[in-house]
Image (cartoon, rainbow, N blue to C red):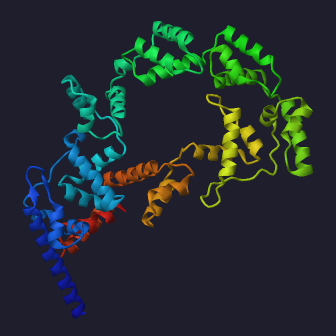
Amino acid sequence: MEQALAADDARLQKRAELSIRVTKLADLAYDDQRGQCDWESVTRDMGMPLIECLRLFDPSLSTFSVRSLPNITDWLANDLSTLKSLVSEQFGAVTADEWPLVGIYMNVEQADCFMAHTMCTFPQMTPDLHEAITRHRNANMEWKNIFEKHPLFSCISGLRNAYYEFKEPGDSKLKAIYSEWTVTDTCRIQELVQTYYKPENQREVLIQAQMAFPNRLQQSIINKIKCTLHNWNADDVARLVHLVSTYKRGEIDWAAIGKDLGRTADLCHLKHDQLDRGNFKPTVEHSQTVSREVQKQYEQQHNMDWTGIAQQLNLSERECLEANQFNTGKAQWIYHPDTFSWDMANRMKTFIKDNYPEPLPVNYTAVSNYMWIDMDDCVKMASLLRGEMAWTSETIAQVVELRKQGMIYKDIARQLSPVLNKSKVVAAYYGHIKSKVNAPLTCKEKHRIKELVDTHAEQMSFTELRALVFPQAAS
C-alpha cells in the first residue's frame, strides 16, 4: 500500500514539474503582438505532442491574460484560419472537455472559441457582422476585400447575399432590396417574359430583367420570372388543351407543345397534369371498384398489373393507384444502412418525379400502392431521401452514443439516412453539447463538484481538476 502511494506521489510530482516547465516555456514563447503563444516551439522544446502540452499548461501560473473575443468581428482573419486548422488537424471533432484546450492554444475564452468555430462551420449574418460590413461598404471597400477580412462564408456571393438578406432584430421590414414586387414591376416582368423568353435560350430574359431592375438580387429576379412562367391565362390554357388533344395518349410531344406556347416542355406537362388531376376526384364508388379488382389480382398472383386494371376500368394507372384502398400484404420499409436498396429508392423517386412533379403535392396513397409498401414507411423514406431528419431526443442519443464509440460524423450520417449530410449531424451534436454546457447546474451537481474539489484540489493542477470536474457536472 505504501509503495503504491509513493509511486502515485512520484507520478503526481513529476506531472507537476512538467506542468510548471510547460507553463514557463509558454510564457517565454508568448507573442504580445499576436496575443498568442508559439505552441510549436513549446512542443519542440518539450519533445511532447501538442495536445499533451496543452493539457499540462496551468493558466493559474501563467503571466499572460486570456483574450475575450465575444463577437465574430473581434476575430482577425488569421485567428479564424488558425482556429479552423487547429480543430481539423488536432481534434477532428472537439468534445466538451477539449474546448478548454482550444481556448488555451488560441489564448481566447473557450466559449468565444466555440462561438467562432460554430460561425465558421455554419456561417450566418449577425448584427455586429452586418454593422461592420456596412462600415466597409460606406468606405467604398470592395466585396472581395470584405470577404478577405471576414472569411466566414464559402464564397463572396454567399457573404453578399447574407448581408442583403439580413433582417434586423425586431424590424418587421426586410431590406429595401428585398421589397415586394409592385403591380407595375410585375407587369414589366410579364412583358419581358413574353418578349424575350424562349425555351432554348432562357438566359436572355434574365439579362433583360437584370438591366430593368439593377437594384434587385439575381435570385429574386429568377424567382419572379419562374412565378410568371407558372401563371397561365385562359387563352394559354385553352391553347394547351387543344394541342394536347391532337396527340394520342402516351405519345404527346411536350417539347413541340412547349415551343408552340413559348414555355418549357416540363411547364406544359406540369400544367396539363394539374388540369387533368382537377378533373378527376376519386369517389367512393371508384375506390370500391378499383379495390375489388386489386384484391382479386392479389389473391390470384400477389402481383399488381396496374396497366391491365386501368384498361379494364377505363381509368388511367395513376387514377387507379390513387383510388385503391386494399392494403393487405404490403411490406414494411424501415431504413437500415446494411439492407438499404437504392434500386427501391430510385424506383420510388422516379415514380414521384414522373407523376407528382413540383409544385404538385405527392399522393402517398398512390406511392404506397405502386411500391406495395406501407404508406407511413413510404412517407418516412421519401423524407429521408430528401435529406430531412427529425432530430428527436432518441436520434440525438443515438448520435451521442455513436460518437462515444469513436464513429466519425460521415458514418453516423450514413447510419441515420442514405443521403444525410454530415454537417447536419455535426450541427445537431454541437447543439446538444451547447445545450448541456449552458444548462444550469442542479443542487446534486453542485454538491458533487464541491466534493471533487475538496478531495483533489491539493494534488491536481487547475487544468487537470477542471477536466475531472466538468464532465461529471455535465452528465
All told, the count of numbered labels is 0
Residue 148 visible from this viewpoint: yes
| Image vertical order of residue 151 relative to residue 246, above or below | below
Residue 442 visible from this viewpoint: no
* 142 horizontally vs 215: left or right: left
| Image vertical order of residue 451 relative to residue 214, above or below | below
| Residue at the image point whose x is 14% and y is 62% from the top | 59
Whole-percent x and y of residue 172? Answer: 36, 22
Whole-percent x and y of residue 278? Answer: 74, 21
| Image vertical order of residue 107 relative to residue 276, above or below | below
* 65 horizontally vs 221: left or right: left
Whole-percent x and y of residue 368? Answer: 73, 43
Kindly indicate the quadrant of the structure image that contains residue 470: bottom left
Q: Quadrant of the C terminus?
A: bottom left
Outermost residue on the front side: it is 200
Query: 291 or 26, which is in the foreground?
Result: 26
